[in-house]
Amino acid sequence: MLVNTPSYFKGRGAQYNPNNKFQKQSYSQEFTEVLDEELLTQEKTEVIYTYPKTIINKVESDDIGFEYSLNPYQGCEHGCVYCYARNTHEYWGYSAGIDFEQKIVVKQNAIEVLEKQLSSKSYVPMPIMLSGNTDCYQPLERKYELTRRILQTCLKYKNPVGIITKNSLITRDIDILKQLAKHNLVHVMISITGTDEEIRWKMEPRSATYKQRFNTIQKLAENGIPCGVMIAPIIPGINNHEIPEVIELASRAGATSASYSIARLNGSVGPIFKDWLQKNFPDKANKVWNQLCDAHGGDVSSSRFGVRMRGQGKMVESIEQLFILSKTRFMRGNETFKFNLSLFNHTPGDSQLALF
């Protein structure tokens, strides 16, 4: 594995390509040469087109919080070093490291497949979560507009949809989101991991600034679109102290709910994150790593249902108390959002398309 290189690849979360566990052969770098570095760190994004047979995924997990998810893209240019979705890139034959940020799979027939599934008489309407894996508003969405067309389709069938994103591009689709919101068919969570821009630049190198994200919450709220803030992941020693400020600023902007999770570094994400941690925070890398291990019973990739998202131990308890106190102080009196499932129609009229 290419871990100890003389260069730090700016604008990247992962700093190397770990071997794909599903591949018998792998690319390795014996010497630091210009050609090798170009192969591993070329700046240009590579787009891979795919045509899946299904697009709505059943989530087989009781601690995720939703039953269906939809991901128009695999891989993500945001480059968040902690992203659990990195592991899914290995199923496509790529690495969870730099490949995840450079080789983006675009599901070209997403709308046609979605229409087919929603119109099926066997389909039972439930809220569909966009970005259950990778961000549906990542940079390529500006060109392909798959997410926008998915929202149009959900409005056509009156199927509820939830969105998690850290990209301000979502404001482009306020026209559709407003129509969904009129019928309680949409809820948005904006992912904000802190307020320190220097840490964001290192941890989420190609994402929107924190200021842009708070402004996004404000624009959504001003247009009657229910939204909350997702503080995920919380990394002890890196961003846990910023919880109160994030909730306060998000509440001022119009967020009516808040949630969080503790970083869980499953599969290949563990070594990728540890390498990044040692390169960016050498003085406290061991302490942060040990705290993450303690939070998950000694294993940063713990898959224990019920506790894997929140962790256990004294550090985790202090984080939970800080979150509860902050939410109580800054978000008192806000109501829990509930999706409307009563309007779904398997055979919507074509007249609704005139809205677009």
Image (cartoon, rainbow, N blue to C red):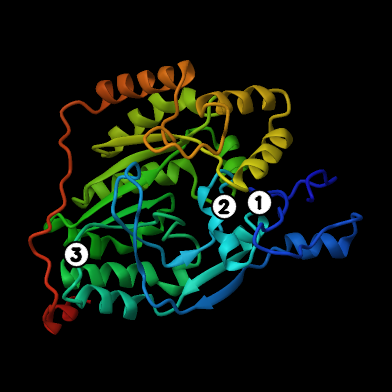
- When the figure is inspected, residue 297 is found, relative to residue 189, above or below; the finding is above
Of the two numbered discs 1 and 3 in the rendering, the one whose residue sits closer to the viewer: 3
Q: Are dots 2 and 3 in contact, CB under 8 Å? A: no
Report the Cα–Cα distance between label 1 and label 3: 37 Å
Q: Position of residue 250 (x, y in %)?
A: 33, 35
Of the two numbered discs 2 and 3 in the rendering, the one whose residue sits closer to the viewer: 3
Please give the label number shown on residue 206: 2
Q: Residue at x 25, y 71 (%)?
A: 152
Q: Residue furthest left?
A: 342
Residue 78 seen in render: no
Please give the label number shown on residue 11: 1
> Please, what is the three-letter code of the amino acid marked with disc 1?
Gly
Q: Residue at x 60, y 36 (%)?
A: 198
Q: Residue at x 73, y 50 (%)?
A: 9
Please give the label number shown on residue 269: none
145 on left or right of 223: right
Q: Position of residue 309 (x, y in %)?
A: 42, 36
> Please, what is the three-letter code of the amino acid marked with disc 2?
Arg
> Please, what is the three-letter code of the amino acid marked with disc 3?
Asn
Please give the label number shown on residue 159: 3
Q: Are dots 1 and 3 in contact, CB under 8 Å? A: no
Q: Position of residue 264 (x, y in %)?
A: 51, 38
Q: Could you classify mark 3 by the number of other residues whose Cα lies within 10 Å: few (under 14), some (14-19), or many (20 or more)?
A: many
Point out the tag, 1 or 3, that comes first from the N-terminus. 1
Q: Are dots 2 and 1 in contact, CB under 8 Å? A: yes
Point out the tag, 2 or 1, that comes first from the N-terminus. 1
Q: Could you classify mark 2 by the number of other residues whose Cα lies within 10 Å: few (under 14), some (14-19), or many (20 or more)?
A: many
